[in-house]
């Protein structure tokens, strides 16, 4: 796929707002301790897999490796429920991410909320949900405008 529109050029203020969200999310793992960077990259990768965003899959696979993720865990991510590679906290975050991505016609019930809250404080869960919401938005932007996959290098975007 080739790029249709350079969305950064045509909506710079909106993109600045998106980047500000990413800066906030980076502070969530660097300063606030809401979650680990590797967990954030797993969540971003899983959401991007669900949404079929090649650019974001490429980016977050590379960023996950840079954060210390193993090939086994990256390859198994789309079948995470069937493996023992992920911690209970990671499983809770992945279930929360899937529920907040596949939201149409699906309820985020009290059971899932309760299971997720076992591993995330109220503020950390809000932060995680903002990270999920943001990557869903990026996926939709990248897919709509044909952001080309394959050329991203880990660390290119400093958040």
Image (cartoon, rainbow, N blue to C red):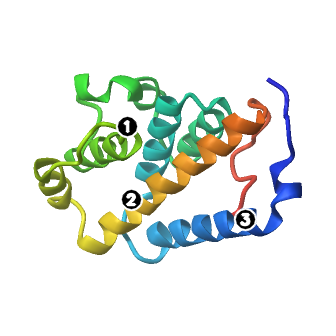
The C terminus lies in which quarter of the figure? bottom right
Q: CA distance from mark 2 to mark 3?
A: 20 Å
Q: Which mark is residue 129?
A: 2
Q: Residue furthest bottom?
A: 31
Residue shown at 86%/42% (left/top)?
5
Dot 2 lies on which element?
Answer: helix
Local crowd at mark 3 within 10 Å, few (<14), some, or many (≥20)? few
Please say if the residues under marks 2 and 1 sit with CB atoms less than 8 Å apart. no
Dot 3 lies on which element?
Answer: helix
User: Mark 3 or mark 1, which is nearer the start of the sequence?
Assistant: 3
Q: Which mark is residue 39?
A: none
User: Mark 1 or mark 2, which is nearer the start of the sequence?
Assistant: 1
Dot 1 lies on which element?
Answer: loop
Q: Position of residue 51 (x, y in %)?
A: 52, 32
Q: CA distance from mark 1 to mark 3?
A: 24 Å
Discs 2/1, front: 1
- Which residue corresponds to mark 1? 102
Task: Give residue 22's quadrant in the image.
Answer: bottom right
- Which residue corresponds to mark 3? 14
Q: Position of residue 106 (x, y in %)?
A: 27, 38
The N terminus lies in which quarter of the figure? top right
Discs 2/3, front: 3
């Amino acid at each position: 796929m080739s790029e249709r529109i350079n969305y950064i050029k045509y909506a710079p203020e909106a993109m600045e707002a998106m980047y500000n969200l990413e800066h906030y999310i980076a502070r969530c793992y660097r300063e606030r301790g809401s979650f680990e960077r590797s967990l954030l990259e797993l969540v971003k990768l899983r959401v991007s897999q669900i949404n079929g965003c090649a650019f974001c899959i490429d980016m977050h696979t590379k960023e996950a490796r840079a954060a210390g993720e193993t090939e086994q865990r990256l390859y198994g991510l789309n079948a995470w429920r069937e493996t023992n590679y992920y911690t209970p906290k990671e499983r809770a975050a992945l279930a929360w991410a899937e529920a907040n991505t596949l939201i149409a016609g699906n309820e985020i019930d009290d059971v899932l909320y309760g299971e997720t809250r076992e591993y995330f404080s109220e503020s950390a869960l809000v932060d995680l949900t903002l990270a999920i919401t943001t990557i869903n938005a990026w996926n939709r932007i990248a897919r709509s405008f044909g952001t080309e996959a394959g050329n991203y290098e880990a660390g290119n975007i400093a958040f």
